[in-house]
Image (cartoon, rainbow, N blue to C red):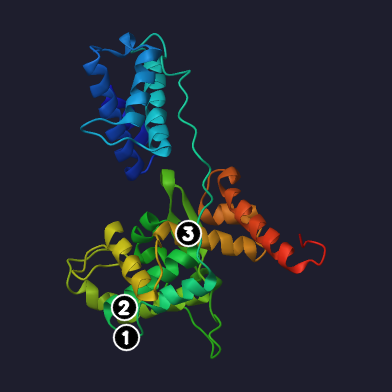
């Protein structure tokens, strides 16, 4: 039953590999929980059994640490979906998880770094023309310049980034505008086209011309855009380490790939971009997800107002 449900999520719902892995882990723990309570079929499960699982998630045990609200909510969502599927497939005659609600999560405002800090971060990749330095600069420029998730960036293929654009003496693009965009594959298999800024475009060109061929010579051939020192696809962990090393050299603490994505969105809204445009660029299915960034910019507006308006002083 569990395998059928996961296959349903992968094929019909189009969930990403990372989300499927999390659901598989959560649901295996849930099945173990049911077996420990002497339940062998979904038809035997009662609402109290699901509630007890939620409590176990939050409390933890010798084998599992207590989960924070967001992780527990994901697990409950997986369990609710599993029971809906069991009911629809006729495996169970009722849905015991229907009334079980996930724990409420504190609303966290996304953290962003300033434009000056972004510039310090990218500069910390180093001016040298080594293949890895050129790759690292291109990677960070793409993460910040497109708002890509780290999985989307390392998942890029060379064909997702049109090559060989022309620039005039002032650094302005002088060719086909289609060259200044990148194709990102997001959650649920959704694909979106995101513009590439001049800095990201030039960093990618330098990497593709002067670095990637040298890295690729060490590998067996891969269409991946970003390569590691052995010529294979750069992993998420590898990209994380690139960012952490640059942040340490730049004197920045707590910088994550997702923080660059937050900074991309916040800086766009600070510059006057419409929230619907930012939604499309980030690949959010709902504008509600994007609107959390407007709270950040409203806070900034309040600060500016309080500091600048003569009647705002207290």
Q: Which residue is mark 3?
A: 261
Question: Is 184 located above or below residue 187 in the figure?
Answer: below
Which residue is drawn at the image coordinates 59% and 56% (left, top)?
A: 278
- Whether label 2 touches label 1, CB < 8 Å: yes
**Neighbour class for label 2 at 10 Å: few (<14), some, many (≥20)?**
some
Q: Which residue is mark 1?
A: 128
Compare residues 220 and 49 and report the one nearer the observer. 49
Residue 14 coordinates in the image, percent (x, y): 40, 39
Left or right placement of residue 47 versus residue 288 in this view: left
Residue 82 coordinates in the image, percent (x, y): 36, 24
Residue 164 appears in view = no
Task: Locate the C terminus and report the quarter of the image it occupies.
Answer: bottom right
- Whether label 2 touches label 3, CB < 8 Å: no
Residue with the most extreme front position: 314
Which residue is drawn at the image coordinates 42% and 38% (left, top)?
A: 70
Q: Which residue is mark 2?
A: 133
Which residue is drawn at the image coordinates 35% and 77% (left, top)?
A: 125
Which residue is drawn at the image coordinates 53% and 43% (left, top)?
A: 107
Residue 115 coordinates in the image, percent (x, y): 53, 71
**Mark pair 1, 3: CA separation:** 26 Å
Mark found first going from the N terminus, 2 or 1? 1
Task: Locate the N terminus and report the quarter of the image it occupies.
Answer: top left
Element type where label 1 sits in the image:
loop
Element type where label 3 sits in the image:
helix
Give the image quarter of residue 310.
bottom right
Checking the image for residue 238, the label placed there is none
**Mark pair 2, 3: CA separation:** 21 Å
């Amino acid at each position: 039953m569990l395998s059928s449900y996961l296959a349903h999520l992968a094929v019909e719902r189009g969930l990403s590999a990372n989300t499927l892995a999390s659901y598989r882990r959560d649901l295996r723990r849930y099945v173990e929980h049911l077996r420990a309570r002497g339940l062998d079929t979904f038809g035997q499960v009662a609402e109290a059994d699901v509630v007890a699982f939620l409590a176990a998630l939050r409390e933890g045990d010798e084998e599992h640490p207590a989960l924070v609200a967001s992780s527990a909510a994901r697990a409950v969502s997986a369990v609710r979906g599993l029971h809906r599927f069991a009911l629809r497939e006729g495996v169970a005659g009722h849905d015991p998880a229907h009334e079980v609600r996930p724990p409420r999560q504190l609303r966290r405002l996304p953290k962003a770094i300033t434009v000056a800090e972004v510039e310090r971060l990218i500069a910390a990749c180093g001016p040298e023309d080594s293949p890895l330095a050129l790759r690292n600069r291109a990677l960070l420029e793409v993460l910040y310049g497109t708002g890509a998730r780290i999985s989307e960036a390392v998942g890029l293929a060379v064909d997702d980034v049109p090559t060989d654009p022309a620039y005039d003496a002032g650094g302005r693009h002088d060719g086909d505008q289609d060259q200044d965009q990148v194709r990102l594959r997001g959650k649920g298999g959704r694909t979106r086209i995101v513009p590439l800024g001049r800095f990201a475009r030039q960093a990618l060109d330098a990497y593709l011309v002067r670095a990637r061929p040298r890295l690729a010579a060490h590998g067996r051939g891969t269409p991946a855009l970003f390569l590691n020192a052995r010529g294979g696809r750069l992993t998420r962990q590898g990209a994380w380490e690139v960012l952490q090393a640059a942040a340490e050299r730049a004197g920045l603490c707590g910088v994550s790939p997702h923080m660059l994505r937050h900074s991309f969105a916040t800086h766009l809204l600070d510059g006057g971009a419409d929230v619907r445009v930012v939604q499309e660029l980030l690949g959010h299915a709902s504008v509600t997800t994007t609107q959390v960034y407007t709270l950040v910019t409203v806070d900034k507006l309040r600060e500016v107002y309080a500091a600048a308006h003569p009647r705002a002083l207290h």
